[in-house]
Amino acid sequence: MKERVREILSWYGSDNPGSLTSLARMLNHGRLGGTGRMVILPVDQGFEHGPARSFAPNPAGYDPRYHFELGIGAGCNAYAAPLGFLEAGAAEFAGDIPLILKLNDSDSLSKGEPCSALTGSVDEALRLGCVAIGFTIYPASSLRNVMLQELRDLTQEAKRKGLAVVVWSYPRGAGISKEGETAIDVVAYAAQIAAQMGAHVIKVKLPTAHIEQDAAKKVYEKEKIPTATLAERARHVVQSAFGGRRIVIFSGGPAKGKAEILAEVQGLADGGAFGSIMGRNSFQRPRTEAIELLHEVMDIYANV
Amino acid sequence: MKERVREILSWYGSDNPGSLTSLARMLNHGRLGGTGRMVILPVDQGFEHGPARSFAPNPAGYDPRYHFELGIGAGCNAYAAPLGFLEAGAAEFAGDIPLILKLNDSDSLSKGEPCSALTGSVDEALRLGCVAIGFTIYPASSLRNVMLQELRDLTQEAKRKGLAVVVWSYPRGAGISKEGETAIDVVAYAAQIAAQMGAHVIKVKLPTAHIEQDAAKKVYEKEKIPTATLAERARHVVQSAFGGRRIVIFSGGPAKGKAEILAEVQGLADGGAFGSIMGRNSFQRPRTEAIELLHEVMDIYANV
Amino acid sequence: MKERVREILSWYGSDNPGSLTSLARMLNHGRLGGTGRMVILPVDQGFEHGPARSFAPNPAGYDPRYHFELGIGAGCNAYAAPLGFLEAGAAEFAGDIPLILKLNDSDSLSKGEPCSALTGSVDEALRLGCVAIGFTIYPASSLRNVMLQELRDLTQEAKRKGLAVVVWSYPRGAGISKEGETAIDVVAYAAQIAAQMGAHVIKVKLPTAHIEQDAAKKVYEKEKIPTATLAERARHVVQSAFGGRRIVIFSGGPAKGKAEILAEVQGLADGGAFGSIMGRNSFQRPRTEAIELLHEVMDIYANV
Amino acid sequence: MKERVREILSWYGSDNPGSLTSLARMLNHGRLGGTGRMVILPVDQGFEHGPARSFAPNPAGYDPRYHFELGIGAGCNAYAAPLGFLEAGAAEFAGDIPLILKLNDSDSLSKGEPCSALTGSVDEALRLGCVAIGFTIYPASSLRNVMLQELRDLTQEAKRKGLAVVVWSYPRGAGISKEGETAIDVVAYAAQIAAQMGAHVIKVKLPTAHIEQDAAKKVYEKEKIPTATLAERARHVVQSAFGGRRIVIFSGGPAKGKAEILAEVQGLADGGAFGSIMGRNSFQRPRTEAIELLHEVMDIYANV
Amino acid sequence: MKERVREILSWYGSDNPGSLTSLARMLNHGRLGGTGRMVILPVDQGFEHGPARSFAPNPAGYDPRYHFELGIGAGCNAYAAPLGFLEAGAAEFAGDIPLILKLNDSDSLSKGEPCSALTGSVDEALRLGCVAIGFTIYPASSLRNVMLQELRDLTQEAKRKGLAVVVWSYPRGAGISKEGETAIDVVAYAAQIAAQMGAHVIKVKLPTAHIEQDAAKKVYEKEKIPTATLAERARHVVQSAFGGRRIVIFSGGPAKGKAEILAEVQGLADGGAFGSIMGRNSFQRPRTEAIELLHEVMDIYANV
């Protein structure tokens, strides 16, 4: 198992030992530690969607400590959240789970072209003992340049200071349709952009079989790129991130039934996904149920 | 042959020895080393056009190491790519081929006036062992000033730190028609702008015989500037970049047949072009075929 | 066991979660992970005593990778070394053992009042993925102020950036006799000074029953401080570092026989020492023998 | 041959691709390019010993261009000199030979404890197109700390900016005798110190069989470290620099006869030295003779 | 004549056009403009020796405007002085004569090892419209490192900002005897050191036939370096500054008779000196006499 982690680290040959160590801490931690697969618990929905929409279904989640305990209890590889949530538990749970500080966040009170606000810094990530920074880009937004330039600066600083970089790459905005946000060509493109920006870990959405861009459609048809099943689509997205030499994980999206989730995860795992990042499907369930589900998800990844 | 490199370097008398050394490393490397001609392999299409459109025709190209190996195997003078692609091979192939870090990139998910996002920095170029930075400007865009001012800052920093500056000068945007993007007057103008901005190496598009600007048309006609053949047009573009005292290379554009490519290159070489920069026509072909083609292209330049 | 680590972390209530996390990484790692006890492998003798004196007895140790493997193989809590030794393995062994970068070092070619040279920095510690910086002070040296002021600056920076601080506190120099360097009053005093300087982990020498300072002697006699056995002396030293609320570990000094080492460690453990730091007694033995010895040492601490 | 260069670069796993590229440029250049061996031309004697003592024997050497031409003509791996000498040819010979900017220098007009003055900077090295900085330390000097701390700062900056670091490690000063400066224990120790400071390339003096330090003597005798022949001594010095995983090259010292030089080089090569750095023995001979000698030296290294 | 200036500028190939322009301004100005020879008027004696010792012999010189007018009237290439003297006339005589701002100065009230105080800055030189900075080093002083490091920093800044660098290189201090300060070996060495530090113009003392250093003596004798006449010694000093490829000018020292001065200048000119820098012998004479003398000196240089 250790060999797989070493192999993955070898893909990042331009990085300092510090960033490699931070990556290794995530890859070696928790129930999937050493397998090269990852399940990350992200809790930024309080910020992004509002507290009631996020935590009312399972009110224990209003308390930031709940999510630390959930991530630790379930044996996740890492826990990602905005500044406030991490500050509220980083001392109490010091060393118990690798932390990812999200450095930008949106809320759903504002309207207009999507572009998250900077809400943290690399130095805050160090202060809180995080192993990585997290950053969201919306590639199809007309504010793309603002976000990419912020990411560029943060990535350079994080790598110099020994942290890993996790990028949420979610095309959204004036450039594409709503349906296009999860189109297979767009999700694959999102993975490529994040990889080119220097991300160590890339988080994308579950891709559908829809193809958004005409120019892409011609190529998918001509080259007969298989996109019928989720496994095929996952495989294409992973391939699109440097031929499988970058860690790509998938988010599950809105809360849904357990069977549906496990079927999706099975598809992802079959397609070579490196793992899942599961927020609402974890913390909106009762704790025991959530841990059970996360363990089943991890078992699927462990047994590929 | 060495004499020609020395002559070319003498045109850049205001530059530090560091930038001259970086230029010399490109001019002296590979199959055309010492001839004063250059063939550069650029691979930014994954970022600019998306992964499937770029790499599906030859899926080996999804893996960033492929392009290092292609550039090295073909004996190109340099390999240019965005941050992620260079990071994925710079350590493994350290010293094997001069590298150009592209500092800005666009994707085709966003719409609106063309203006690439900053995706790298001069310090990253140093960290990765590059000899040059690359930067794209779209002179006819309404965001021209943003790009030129970014270029100004990066050029000053790069020259202070001993790097060379390669500018992709592609007029595009509200100021001109689609056809005008490759019009002879526009391409010549693009070369002049890049030269005036301080570029060491200027990359322009293959010019057509079309003349975009009325004011220019009058002069071309009055002065009887020959633009009928590609050789004539290449000669005019090279002349437009400081009377031939700046290195001007031409991109080939979309993938096409070998015969067509070689005919174009012959025209460019006859017109005094300093070389070609060939992306899709290289990496979208099978490796052996691509190397064969690149060698034939280099032979044309070597035998002018 | 985890409870003990949490208790220890509670003593450092003014520290950022980052430093606590770094401390936790050491306390939770290896064979003694979670016990609140630590055995650290330090290898700075190549720098401090010279290569042959350090590595000729077991020439495998000339190779820096050997010490990473020894520390990992024996299950030490951390491995401490100067810049060069860490650089030579930090990428290859990323994440496999917590690292401490020694920021100052002496060699035995120079003469004069003891004062180590700065040989690393906090930023280098981050770059290499270390959890802590290490720093040596010689409290009885006439250059004390130079060292304490350097430590002050480095401690502040390290704590701001989420690292732990390990201080080697070795009184030496014009202020005391040779015998006094390990006198019980002096060693206890050394522990107090390091604690007052803000150290998280304090490394002192094995104390003898000798009392160096007259003013101290009167008190030790009047207050009947027990110092006859090593356990008593260890207890006094630990007490001297904030009543046992700072981690104090002891070095074993020059290479010696196994029985002698284990007897010493038993005394330390009985006296409440938090652990040992064993360099020459580890890496100058053949690998298997060294690991056996380290395991026996750890077992003593584990079974107190 | 290329394989050997790749193997050597693998020893420096904590370094940026930029520094690896700079190292590769030296290792791949000149007559020994690709062999993993190096012969470097250093010309700092004008500064260190004065102009007449350095250049009167072959007055062509007063002109700084002479040394560029000598290094290029002989096919040396690199040319090392202080600021003024490099400034006087860096533009004219841009790209023709890898350059090392010496960042500190002494002159023989001053007396007192040895400590070179800073005479250049990392940014000057970039401006002049150098691949490395050079720095001299005198470990036995009472000003050791000044020098090591300057080196620490310069090394960190150079590595961040993609340069290699070459350290001249010459114990000298109050701590040792004149004879001790080249004693085997001292030279081996000097190599170890430079390696621990993070040097990529280490330059030491030719070691004699003398042993300077009593504490070392006991170990050399007990462990029966062979030091009778130059090959044995070279082997021990190379081993002392991280078990052979750092590049160690030897200086020849004062001008001497050709036969003597070649015998010395044979001994060094037999002992596994990575090469020689030959100043006075090169540039004080007439040009043709010097090139002949350098070629014979290179042949010895090439044929080990 | 212009050709000679161009030739001289070609020796400084690593310099920015700004520094070359500044050098050219001096070389092209005044009665010797275009000859490649220079006579500079320096007036720092008020600071260095005190006002009465400097100006009482010709009280007009108390007024700073006097020296501007003298330099302009005599057609000197440049006028060099400390901050206060330049501030007192830079506006009034703006553009009338190239100015050199001396950035360090000593006074004769203090005792101890020679080391001038910083009394100006590069930015002040720009503010006052100067073409160059001036800086004094005392190579044989035990404070050598302080001065060389200051010069290093100032030189880098001055060159980046387009100024020329003039170095007064006057060995003095604990390392040599009083007689040694003007010994031929020492003056030649002083010229070499200034050249290695990156000086554009080097000012040294009139050398005597004395040889100070034993190690040098052997070489001067063995190589039969001619030092009997001033012309021979000047030739050797010029050669010692990069084989004649750096501008070396000589100071005349204390006031003396006209015949003596002219004889000295004739010797210098015969030996290939680039010119003279004449302070006390100019401004301590009545104005007309001084101008006459300066003209005769210039005529000698013009007619070599």
Image (cartoon, coloured by chain):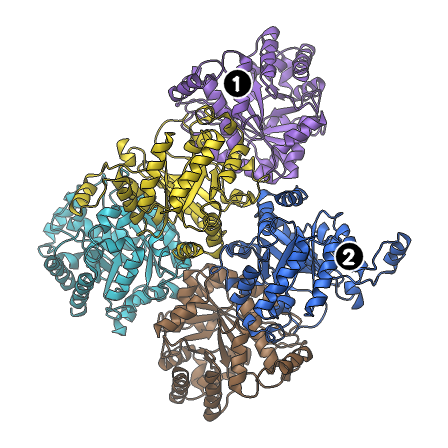
Chain colours: A brown, B blue, C cyan, D yellow, E purple
The spot of residue B265 in percent (x, y) is: 71, 60
Q: Residue pushed farthest left?
A: C228
Judge left or right: residue E199 versus residue C46: right
Position of residue A256 relative to residue C150, above or below, is below
Tell me, for residue B231, which label it has, or none.
2
Position of residue C114 relative to residue E276, above or below, is below
Judging depth in this view, the residue of A43 and D209 nearest the camera is: D209
C-alpha span from label 1 to label 2? 72 Å
The quarter of the image holding the C terminus of chain E is top right
Q: Which residue is mark 1?
A: E49
The spot of residue E267 in percent (x, y) is: 58, 13
- Asked which secondary structure carries label 1, the reply is helix
Judge left or right: residue C277 versus residue A163: left
- Asked which secondary structure carries label 2, the reply is helix
The quarter of the image holding the N terminus of chain E is top right
Judge left or right: residue B41 versus residue A156: right
